[in-house]
Image (tube, helix red, strand yellow):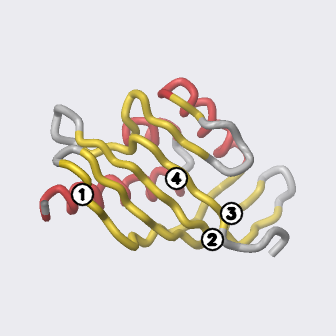
Amino acid sequence: MAQDEAAIRITLASYNTALNSGKVSAVLPLYTQDGICMAPFSPSSIGQSALEKAYEGFFREMKFDVKFNIAEVVMAAPDWAFVRTNSAGTTLHRSTGKTVSEANQELFVMRKGSDGRWRISRYSFSPINPPGS
């Protein structure tokens, strides 16, 4: 279990780096083929094609500088786990040129593939800063 938790932490660190780099090509391999991202105020992005489109939109509008902190990793089965995180930092909104404080709470459902790699199966997050802060 310690080895799986370490591998999950590596996947989430890679996601953090990919998000801050703004590279869709770095984000997509971290998701399962049927992965889902559930962003606030948006319909769910389901599957690699929808994820690609969603992240292209995110990165076109926003430049992230955030850090994820893992609050807990829970192994639910040999090939399933969930991870609760908190993130904070800043986001530059390209359409306005404004940089704002960013803080979220996140829930990742992770799945271990037949290749032994842990990937994001489901990802949901919500802001913890009040609107307009």
Return the x and y of residue 26 as percentages of the image width and height. 43, 42
> Which residue carries the number 4 mark?
19
Query: What amino acid type is highlighted by mark number 2?
Result: Ala
Which of the marked residues, 4 or 1, is nearer the chain's N terminus?
Answer: 4
Residue drawn at (65%, 55%), measured in percent from left and top?
Answer: 63
**In front of the other: label 1 or label 3?**
1
Tag in front: 1 or 2: 1
> Vertical placement of 113 versus 99: above or below?
above
In the picture, the quarter occupied by the C terminus is bottom right
Q: Using the image, tell me which numbered label, if any, was put on residue 103.
A: 2
First along the sequence among labels 3 and 2: 3
Which of pointers 4 and 1 indicates the residue nearer the eye?
1
Badge 2 local density, few (<14 within 10 Å), some, or many (20+)?
A: many
Q: Which residue does the numbered mark 1 point to in the structure image?
A: 75
Q: Nearer the viewer, mark 4 or mark 2?
A: 2
> Residue 69's quadrant in the figure?
bottom left
Per the model, the C-alpha gap separating discs 1 and 2 is: 25 Å
What residue occupies the far top of the structure in this picture?
49
Regarding mark 3 in the picture, which secondary structure is present there? Answer: strand
Q: Where 13 sits versus 128, above or below?
A: above
The residue pinned by badge 3 equals 91
Mark 1 touching mark 3, by CB under 8 A?
Answer: no
- Indicate the amino acid at tag 4: Leu
Mark 4, other Cα within 10 Å: few <14 / some 14–19 / many ≥20: many
Looking at the image, is mark 3 or mark 2 nearer the viewer? Answer: 2
Image coordinates for residue 39, horizontal then vertical, percent: 63, 48
Helix, strand or loop for disc 1: strand
